[in-house]
Amino acid sequence: MGIFEKFFVRNTAGSNEQGHFPDVVLHKKKILEILHKTSRPVFLAEKRILLDRYDRLENALKQNWKKYQIAYSLKTNYDIARSRIFQSQGAWAEVVSGYEYVLAKRLGFSGSEIICNGPIKRDNELIAAVQQNALVHIDNQDELLRVMRLGRILKDKARLGLRISTLLPSGKTSRFGFSVPNGEALAAVRLLHSSHIRLKSIHLHIGSDVDSVDSYQKAAKLMALFCNEVERIQKFPVSCIDMGGGFPADGKAPYGYGHWSSKPISDYIQAIAYSLRRYLARPNTKTLVVEPGRYLVDNAVIFITRIYNVNRCNGVIQVLTDGSVTLLPLSYYRPQIVKVYSPLCIRKTGDSLHGIIYGATCQENDMLYEGGLPKDISIGDYVVYYSVGAYNSSMGNRFITGYNKPTIFI
Ligand SMILES: Cc1ncc(COP(=O)(O)O)c(C=O)c1O
């Protein structure tokens, strides 16, 4: 068994969703056509996997909650946003900047299908979003005061919500939203109430790559109890419970995570729904919103690079490729899953030796992978990176390579 099979077998335990990655051999003909047309590394996204992820999430929501809404977090992968694949399934857009708001509008989302989060919303952006009926989550004290100042324009028809936070796993206070444990969130509700501004939504995003089902269950309990309190103060129902994103996909454990075990999406949704049903005073009146990014897109995308040099030195294989950490910035966040293919897309699965894969820039630390590599790896082979759909193409840059190629869909 090669190192890659070992990885997949290890990660299969406890989940029935693992192994849903593009199959290079199955799509060999199409992939070779694409590779022969370009001399550059490419991101490839498999539409079937994107739709499959969406269906699993939607089914989980359908089985556990009456009214629900998925809002795709645009920043996770703009190329996938531009493909409109989730939009065509009924997803809304979750945006965190003025740029993303404009992108969402350009993609054809109506204002009412856009959720505005993020720490900085300028006055003109706030006013436009509210006037176009977007759902706006107030993130911080300054924004709250500005919303109150703009009150006359905003308050009557505004779909306003409040982002709340709980303690981070480290025990620290989050930099986003209003803290429930230290009383900031309730103080904000009282202040808004004193200006006759009603909250229609409460938002809680507990982090990214949260593999613990229990964390979601606890977060939903906090959300429900807080929502009851909001309704008691403002004497007006909250219609929307937004539990954010953070659901994991099937990449390796991020650096620094001791234990890692991503579960099927239904486990997270069930845990959220359980707490909301149990603790919300009026659960049936609420729309449950989720804002996934990574869960929807990470598995579906692969990154294909070419090998330009192989150096065997003191038992270590040093491989030079035209990829780069500038194109795959999450190389610094988690170890990569890689497989090596011959120029005809035949998988190289022979004995492995310790190796390092380097990128195309002049940086000594442009290192994408360290671990086992097939002994017969050679110039012209392809190194394929798996589970790279989230945040790489959107955070990647043009440093030295001069390009940041759009994703191609298969
Ligand atoms: C408010 C909010 N919602 C949704 C997301 C999407 O998170 P993920 O890609 O982990 O699902 C993020 C990511 O940081 C976020 O900040």
Image: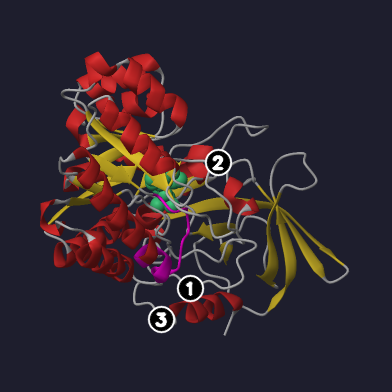
Badges 3 and 1: C-beta atoms under 8 Å apart?
yes
In the depicted structure, whether residue 322 falls above or below residue 247: above
Name which quarter of the figure residue 236 lies in.
Answer: top left
Residue 405 visible, this angle: yes
Write down the residue under mark 2.
40
2 or 3: tag closer to the N-terminus? 3
Write down the residue under mark 1.
261
Calculate the distance from the C-alpha at mark 2 to the C-alpha at mark 3. Answer: 38 Å
Instruction: Please tell me which residue lies in front, 253 or 44.
Output: 253
Residue at far right of view: 314
Badges 1 and 2: C-beta atoms under 8 Å apart?
no
Q: Magenta span covers which residues?
A: 205-217
Label 2: how many Cα within 10 Å (few below 14, some 14–19, many 20+): some
Q: Does the beta carbon at disc 2 come under 8 Å from ligand 1?
A: no
Q: Position of residue 350 (x, y in %)?
A: 62, 78
- Say the numbered circle drawn on residue 280: none
In the depicted structure, whether residue 254 falls above or below residue 190: below
Residue at far bottom of view: 1
Calculate the distance from the C-alpha at mark 3 to the C-alpha at mark 1. Answer: 8 Å
* Mark 1: amino acid: Ser
Write down the residue under mark 3.
14
Q: Position of residue 118 (x, y in %)?
A: 42, 34
